[in-house]
Amino acid sequence: WILAAVMWVAVLRLPAPANQYAWFAAKGMQLVGSFGLAVLAAPWVLPEYWLAQLTFIYIYATVGVGLMLLAGFTGQFSIGHAAFLGVGAYTEAALVGLGVPFPIALACAMGMSAAVGVLVGLPALRVKGLYLGISTMAFGFIVAEVFARWESVTGGNSGMHVKAPAIGGWALDSGVEFYFLCLVLAVGSTLAILNLLRSPTGRAFVAIRDSE
């Protein structure tokens, strides 16, 4: 983080060129580069506790870009977005516990979250605004109650003990390896959303927001 701050200050002290756009573009690229260096160096600089907190940030960022697509670009009001995170997380944990390889379990978890989203979205087609928010909030309460009561699958309030993810024969059983796994998934999700927004489907999402 100190390295990132020093590099950013150095860019701010550069004299502004005649082309202001090029100057701001250069500063932006420098900021992205310095931030990337800080993120890559974090496992060897931060203590274990702060590394775990940063890992959680990447997990929540992955969820956040989905909520950004729904609320920010499509203009739909949702309060129960965390329920989809829970559905995917428990699906992943259950499949890994049954011996399913991590990449396959991850794909199945994403598919299950998407399928539940369709089941919730179809009845909610006739509502919007505050009423849509209330329906998604009710869905979140229902899912939380199911997770707490279905102890044979979810472990109830005690949760589940999940094995470390493994890709091929490589077990990601350390905090540093899990950190980079979450980082890759967060970056991949963000890039996927950006590409989606440039597509006709993404422009249709924005049109839905602008039409309401």
Image (cartoon, rainbow, N blue to C red):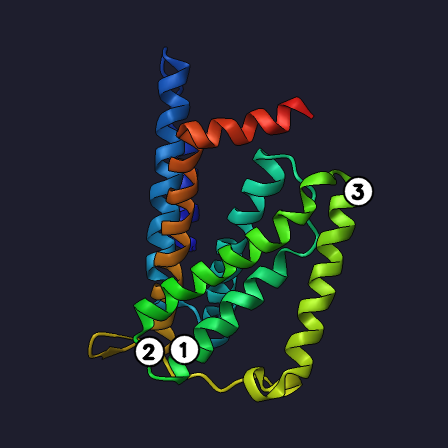
Q: Nearer the viewer, residue 175 or 131?
A: 131
Q: Secondary structure at mark 3?
A: helix
What residue type is disc 3 on? Answer: Leu
Query: Marks 1 and 3, Cα distance to the nearest angstrom?
Result: 36 Å
Q: Earlier in the sequence, mark 1 or mark 2?
A: 1
Q: Secondary structure at mark 2?
A: loop
- Which residue is located at x 53 percent, y 85 percent? 160
Crowding at mark 1 (Cα within 10 Å: few <14, some 14-19, many 20+)? some
Would you say the residues marked 1 and 2 are in contact, meaning their CB atoms lie under 8 Å apart? yes
Query: Marks 2 and 3, Cα distance to the nearest angstrom?
Result: 40 Å
Reading the image, the residue beneath label 3 is 130
Indicate whether 116 appears above or below 169. Answer: above
Q: Secondary structure at mark 1?
A: helix
- Which residue is located at x 42 percent, y 46 percent? 190
Would you say the residues marked 2 and 3 are in contact, meaning their CB atoms lie under 8 Å apart? no
Label annotation for residue 95: 1
Quarter of the rendering occupied by the N terminus: bottom left
Crowding at mark 3 (Cα within 10 Å: few <14, some 14-19, many 20+)? few
Reading the image, the residue beneath label 2 is 100
- Which residue is located at x 33 percent, y 58 percent? 40
Quarter of the rendering occupied by the C terminus: top right
Q: Earlier in the sequence, mark 2 or mark 3?
A: 2
Res 13 visible: no
Answer with the quarter of the image where residue 157 lies: bottom right
Q: Earlier in the sequence, mark 1 or mark 3?
A: 1
Residue 71 in the image, given as x and y percentages of width and height: 63, 40
Q: Nearer the viewer, residue 177 or 196?
A: 196
Would you say the residues marked 1 and 3 are in contact, meaning their CB atoms lie under 8 Å apart? no
What residue type is disc 2 on? Answer: Val
Q: Determine the residue located farthest toward the left in the rendered image.
A: 169
What residue type is disc 1 on? Answer: Leu
Left or right for 6, reference 124? left
